[in-house]
Image (cartoon, rainbow, N blue to C red):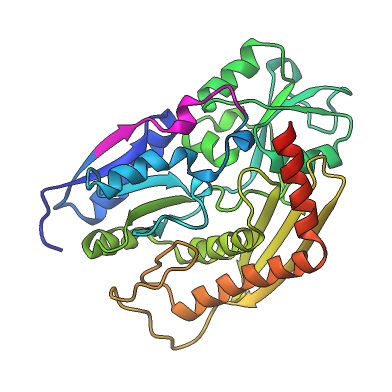
Amino acid sequence: MERRNVIRVGTRKSQLARIQTDSVVEKLTNKFPQADFEIVAMSTTGDKILDTALSKIGEKSLFTKELENALERNEVDLVVHSLKDLPTSLPPGFTIGAVCKRESPYDAVVFHPKNVGNTLESLPTNSTIGTSSLRRAAQLKKRYPHLQFKDIRGNLNTRLKKLDEQNDFSAIILAAAGLRRMGWENRIDQILSPEQCLYAVGQGALAIEVRAKDQDILSMVSALQDPHTVLRCVAERAFMKRLEGGCSVPVAVSTKIEDSQLYLTGAVYSLDGSDSLKETMQTNVVFPNEEVDGPNDDGQHVGITALGVPRRALDSAEHLGIELADLLLSKGAKEILTVARQLNDAR
């Protein structure tokens, strides 16, 4: 790759976003020592509106719009996001050029200091659990009917402060990946397995968004592509896109790759968790002797351009997500989600 002057990397201003971006820049610097990377931090709408539940404000671009505007205006060359913040359809002209190796996708419970040593099961009746996610609340209400769930907003630092310094919450639920990246693994009191709580689409994975036509940057970031993570996330995103799920409805997944098979479990829930549909399907994602597409192939899979990952495997993963969504739709998923959306809008 020819020497470029400076490659500008866009990020949100939050501490977690900065840590995530720094980790990506460090990896890129190791692979491309001749390039200079400069980090450009900015605030997004989602960072500014802190008094409203995420599910009430609207769609997913809350944390990404300003960053994409900067990308469009050539003010930055690439942007680092949490993949779960990115909508399943990106605006024209953009693509996810790499999905890095996934950190833990699971949800974690952090207890108020006076409750440490408990699990959700053993908390006293009517204890209040803080979460801004309809997906978490719907699953956990059903599993732990003795608990109350209440919205909590703000970045990780703010939420942990609210938990520790006020007596409003007995515990809060956060993504394990974020706590780990911040170096706060010691705050994790309980990890929720997929049996207890399926996770969000793309949770735990970092995505690098670029201009779709910028071949230099696209091939550069593709060096950080993790094939297993990409295949799992393509299936998850295809599932969500087919269901037309966003922040405002409870849609949840779990994926794994074992012995050349990709397994996808997907579910939809009513807001209180009383009504739900959950199924698992699998598909083959290993094809012998397959040619990998070259850099001029611009086929996207749910917004992802995965250079270096076999096309048939990506097609297979995307098809799996669509098929699983269709199965749930045939069993009444649309009705559950429509009611959930209406109730959420009315809250």
- Magenta-colored stretch includes residue 151: no
**What's the residue at 56%, 33% (across, down)?**
185
Q: Is residue 122 left or right of residue 216?
A: right
> Can the viewer see residue 253?
yes
> Can the viewer see residue 262?
no
Q: Is residue 169 left or right of residue 312?
A: right
| Residue found farthest to the bottom | 289
Q: Is residue 193 left or right of residue 141?
A: left
For the record, the magenta segment spans 39-52
Instruction: Name above or below for residue 169 compared with residue 121.
Output: above
**What's the residue at 89%, 23% (across, down)?**
125
**What's the residue at 78%, 44% (across, down)?**
139
Quarter-of-image position of residue 263: bottom right
**What's the residue at 82%, 40% (across, down)?**
272
Q: Position of residue 264 (x, y in %)?
A: 67, 65
Instruction: Name above or below for residue 138 compared with residue 317.
Output: above
Which residue is more in the foreground, 285 or 115? 285
Placement of the N terminus among the 4 image quadrants: bottom left
Q: Is residue 105 left or right of residue 47?
A: right
- Magenta-colored stretch includes residue 43: yes
Instruction: Name above or below for residue 69 compared with residue 124.
Output: below
Q: How many marks?
A: 0
Q: Position of residue 327 (x, y in %)?
A: 75, 70
Quarter-of-image position of residue 347: top right
Q: Position of residue 104 (x, y in %)?
A: 57, 48
Which residue is more in the foreground, 132 or 57? 57
Which residue is more in the foreground, 147 or 42? 42
Q: Position of residue 34 (x, y in %)?
A: 13, 53
